[in-house]
Image (cartoon, rainbow, N blue to C red):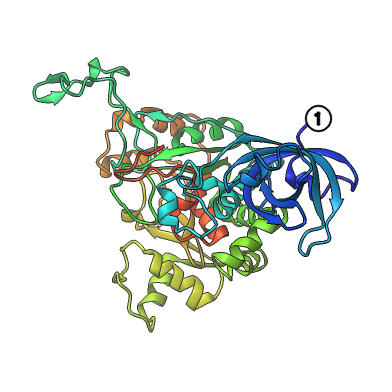
Amino acid sequence: MKRTRIADLLVGEKIGDDIVVMGWVRTRRDSKGGFSFIELNDGSCLTGIQVIADQTLPNYQDEIVKLQTGCSIRVSGILTESPGKGQKVEVKANALTVLGWADPDVYPLQKKRHSFEFLRTIAHLRPRTNTFGAVARVRNAMARAIHDFFQKRGFIYLHTPIITGSDCEGAGEMFRVTTFNLDKVPQENGKIDFTKDFFGGPANLTVSGQLEAEIYALAMGDVYTFGPTFRAENSNTSRHLAEFWMVEPEMAFCDLEGNVDLAIAFLKDIFASVLRDCREDMEFFNRFVDKTVVRTVEDLISLEFEWISYTEAIRLLGKANQKFEYPVEWGSDLQSEHERYLCEKVFGKPVVLTDYPKEIKPFYMKMNEDGKTVRAMDVLAPKIGEIIGGSQREDDYDILYKRIVDAGLNIDDYWWYLDLRKFGTVPHAGFGLGFERLIQFVTGLSNIRDVIPFPRTPGNLSF
């Protein structure tokens, strides 16, 4: 008989059906009446199902009464109405097979609550906890919703390269890819001779798929990427990962206003989807992680976004009746504390900031007519700050050329990017969204390492 997922048992199966369910034991308690209550969970939903195992089962004394948290079992039986509170159905076992034992003396996940710090040390087991099972389901639902959002709007899903020769952000914080024997790196005139390396030149792990996505946007109209990106920033904080996932749409024939409109529609759609499809998990986060997380997400769906310029934001922050850790002045990059102040204290809702100084933004953002600012946009959300960053892209060849040179980048590495401005250039725009930061916002989890299955951080390559 085919296994039935617990999530399906709780909503779809009929009382009296013969079923097979498999999963991991959360708890077992024995009754004086000669049977055991086993709470079973298979990861398909937050709620487990209760299994009633009677002492008449042939392996009751030898195996069933020895079951502990973490053991895996197969149960065949009948779905029945449950007289207990908080559960509509339960399984009366006709047969129970132990698939795998878990020694309680060494199994690290017991009934007590464990700290997130401890659970990060056992990333191979933490998905079995309620919190990380819920994170995985929310992450899955949001990934599906992202694809649905773009596919319904006619976007082409694009796989951009993970290995690249260009630095999209111009920050230089990239992981090098090489086949060199690091004990014998070939050199020429005191410099590394990359002509002898696998690709014949310096190669890195990508920090963004944006530049390559622009190639296809300027041929196919609307495209998006959704894949892993990498930053070699040596920041061991709750906000940074060395490996993370990015969502990056690029749209031809699109200006800054169209870019902002798409970003807002995107966020509202994704949040509505997760509230609809993961309600049980969201209520779990609202109860045990952040008691305001559901309301915060609902507010973002219903509220209008405030739209102000960077210059106006600096003015508002300058007269704030609050002392910031980082000083605020025109030309400085805004920090999370500034972004959150604007959302939470000034406007009480999400904020879109546009028209940043060119010096603090990458070379590819389109210059405004004032020659000082670029058509950049950041979408800020309460509790987290920036959640989306994007811009209208520079489509003028001469201006782009100068911006690349002024950024200190090798112009020869961007010949193809400049070509796009020589042959049929058009206005175009796009944005990037860090998937893990989006999940942080939705779940209320404060550390980004807890919303990705296997966090990659400085000094940590476990699992």
Between residues 83 and 404, which one lies in front from this camera angle?
A: 83
User: Is residue 433 something that shows in the picture?
Assistant: no
User: Is residue 144 something that shows in the picture?
Assistant: yes
Q: Which residue is mark 1?
A: 1
Residue most extreme to the bottom:
321
Q: Quadrant of the C terminus?
A: top left
Residue at position x 53%, y 44% in the image: 247
Where is residue 196 shown, x and y percent of the image?
A: 23, 15
Total numbered circles: 1
Amino acid type assigned to the residue bearing label 1 in the image = Met
Where is residue 92 shown, x and y percent of the image?
A: 81, 46
Between residues 240 and 324, which one lies in front from this camera angle?
A: 240
Neighbor class of circle 1 (other Cα within 10 Å; few <14, some 14-19, many 20+) is few
Is 423 rendered above or below residue 68? above
Residue most extreme to the left:
189
Residue 57: which quarter of the image?
Answer: top right
Between residues 15 and 56, which one lies in front from this camera angle?
A: 56
- Disc 1 is placed on an element classified as loop
Where is residue 214 shown, x and y percent of the image?
A: 50, 36
Q: Quadrant of the N terminus?
A: top right
Residue at position x 88%, y 41% in the image: 17
Residue at position x 42%, y 41% in the image: 396
Where is residue 204 shown, x and y percent of the image?
A: 33, 31
Between residues 111 and 149, which one lies in front from this camera angle?
A: 111
Is 370 rendered above or below residue 314? above
